[in-house]
Image: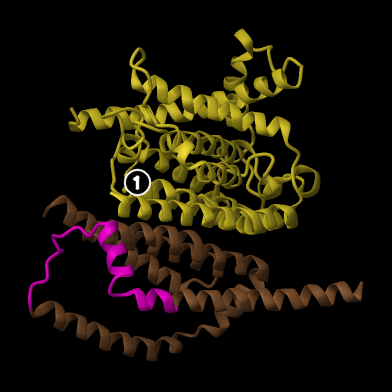
Chain colours: A yellow, B brown
């Protein structure tokens, strides 16, 4: 089944599917926000306003692609591509259904963590290359925020690794036949969720680009499709984090038999993406020092407690049997 | 030539070129980017010789965390084109003489080592589990010492930061 042609088909459909999904998500998010805030949202272009996604792309592609003369041109152009590449690479290890994945590495979970940590460079270098005070501050903030939340993100999934005994995402899904890990690893899930929002710097943790204090943060100087790539990267990040969350905490493709496995995967991911949007609509942005102290004073102890308890219970069960 | 060997030589070339570029750049940020690329290339080499765990750690820890802190520091310094000129003045060709001599010794050693028994790419794949068992088995002391060192560093940094905060509050 897994011959070469099949893998190429999966690679192509993953690339095409995720980028299209990310573009449509820009419209879908605004529509959903409108729904939750009791207003219409963008509903003019095409049926339900879905044409807005294409209008947005046309607008971004036809805008002047300006590189500021005072910027560091080499890095300025290099920065927005990094986030796109890193996030798309992350999808290489996501198992969509049994047999439908690009690669089943035995280090898949670590590979995902590696790719999200490379995405930091996009924001960091974008802020640095702009030679703009607001952009620099945004970049500094993002570096501190993303590097520290990466720590908890990595630690929070270790409980899942302990329970399933593998870093491979396919094995992790198969280990959830009886019980989803969101039940047995609730603390881990909670920390992963918050760290995931901070990693993709989505609202309410969008401090690198906080509009009312930093103009637009790290992408102040960006326009046209370079800005579009930052935007697309952010939405790709949301989809990636949601699908990884589905895989390691919500049983991936597992579900009742009356629907194909890939549908269950898509449905769970979709619900998680809606939850990301709901968080944006519901929660105000914290102050920067609040964000950092929440991370180091609440998240870190929580993950360590979770890790110790999981390890202790596993050892205890081992001595019983 | 197998595809793996071809990939190995390609990654090795990228690593060499990017390291040389990292050493010779006058702009600190550009040098750092080349260093990151060199680390990523060595991650691919690790993967190809059958150590996927080491490869991913190279990406997560070196490229993803340590180099981010390097870039962070460079951002704080706010270097401009005047600093590039300064670097240009400081880094004279004569500076390369002694390091090149030391490198030559290592190079000769490497040529000797490579010429004696034919060490091919190792055939065994080392899984994360084996690395973990080795780390927490025979090498537990090294792990403990590293952990203590990190904890000492953490407490030291906290102490310095705290005194600064207390001083700032007093002045207010």
Dot 1, crowdedness within 10 Å: few (<14), some or many (≥20)? Answer: many
Magenta stretch: includes residue A239: no
Q: Nearer the viewer, residue B36 or B43?
A: B43
Asked if the stretch drawn in magenta spans residue B144, the answer is yes
Residue A70 visible? The answer is no
Instruction: Estimate the x, y position of residue A320 in percent, counting from the top left.
Output: 32, 51
Q: In the rendered view, would you say A220 is above or below B131?
A: above
Determine the secondary structure under disc 1: helix
Residue A126 location in percent, x, y? 60, 52
Residue at (74% x, 74% y) in the render: B162
A5 and A31: which is toward the camera: A31
Residue situated furthest top in the rendering: A47
Residue at left offset 66%, top offset 29%: A278
On screen, residue B61 above or below A169: below
Which quadrant would residue B160 be assigned to in this image? bottom right
Pick out the residue farthest to the right. B172
Residue that badge 1 annotates: A108
Question: What stretch of residues is rendered in magenta?
Answer: B117-145
């Amino acid at each position: 089944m897994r011959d070469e042609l099949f893998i190429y088909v999966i690679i192509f459909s993953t690339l095409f599917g995720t980028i299209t999904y990310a573009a449509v998500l820009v419209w879908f998010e605004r529509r959903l926000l409108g729904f939750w805030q009791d207003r219409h949202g963008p509903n003019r272009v095409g049926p339900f306003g879905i044409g807005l996604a294409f209008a947005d792309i046309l607008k971004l592609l036809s805008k002047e692609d300006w590189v500021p003369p005072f910027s560091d041109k080499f890095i300025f152009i290099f920065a927005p591509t990094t986030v796109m590449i890193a996030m798309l690479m992350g999808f290489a290890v996501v198992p969509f259904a049994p047999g439908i994945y690009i690669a089943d590495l035995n280090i898949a979970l670590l590979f995902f963590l590696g790719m999200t940590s490379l995405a930091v460079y996009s924001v960091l270098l974008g802020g640095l290359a702009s030679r703009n005070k607001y952009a620099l501050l945004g970049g500094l903030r993002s570096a501190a925020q993303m590097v520290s939340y990466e720590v908890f993100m990595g630690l929070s999934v270790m409980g899942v690794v302990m329970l399933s005994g593998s870093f491979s995402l396919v094995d992790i899904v198969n280990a959830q036949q009886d019980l989803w890990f969101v039940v047995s690893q609730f603390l881990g899930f909670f920390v992963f969720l918050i760290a995931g929002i901070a990693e993709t710097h989505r609202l309410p943790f969008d401090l690198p680009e906080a509009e009312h204090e930093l103009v637009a943060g790290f992408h102040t100087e960006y326009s046209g499709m370079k800005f579009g790539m930052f935007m697309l990267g952010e939405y790709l990040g949301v989809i990636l984090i949601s699908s990884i969350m589905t895989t390691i905490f919500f049983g991936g493709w597992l579900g009742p038999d009356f629907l194909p496995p890939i549908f269950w995967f898509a449905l769970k991911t979709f619900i998680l993406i809606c939850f990301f949007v709901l968080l944006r609509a519901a929660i105000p942005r914290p102050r920067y020092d609040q964000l950092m102290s929440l991370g180091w004073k609440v998240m870190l102890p929580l993950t360590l407690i979770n890790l110790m308890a999981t390890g202790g219970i596993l050892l205890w069960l081992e001595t019983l049997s | 030539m197998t595809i793996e060997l071809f990939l190995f030589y390609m990654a090795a070339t990228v690593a060499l070129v990017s390291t040389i570029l990292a050493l010779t750049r006058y702009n600190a940020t550009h040098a750092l980017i080349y260093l990151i690329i060199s680390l990523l290339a060595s991650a691919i080499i690790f993967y190809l010789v059958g150590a996927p765990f080491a490869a991913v750690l190279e990406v997560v820890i070196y490229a993803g965390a340590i180099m981010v802190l390097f870039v962070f520091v460079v951002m704080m310094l706010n270097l401009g084109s005047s600093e590039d000129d300064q670097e240009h003045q400081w880094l004279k060709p004569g500076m390369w003489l002694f390091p090149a001599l030391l490198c030559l010794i290592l190079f000769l050693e490497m040529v000797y080592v490579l010429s004696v028994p034919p060490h091919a790419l190792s055939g065994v794949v080392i899984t994360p589990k084996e690395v973990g068992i080795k780390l927490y088995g025979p090498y537990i002391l090294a792990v403990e010492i590293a952990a203590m060192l990190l904890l000492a560093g953490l407490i030291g940094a906290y102490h310095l930061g705290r005194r600064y905060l207390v001083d700032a509050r007093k002045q207010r």
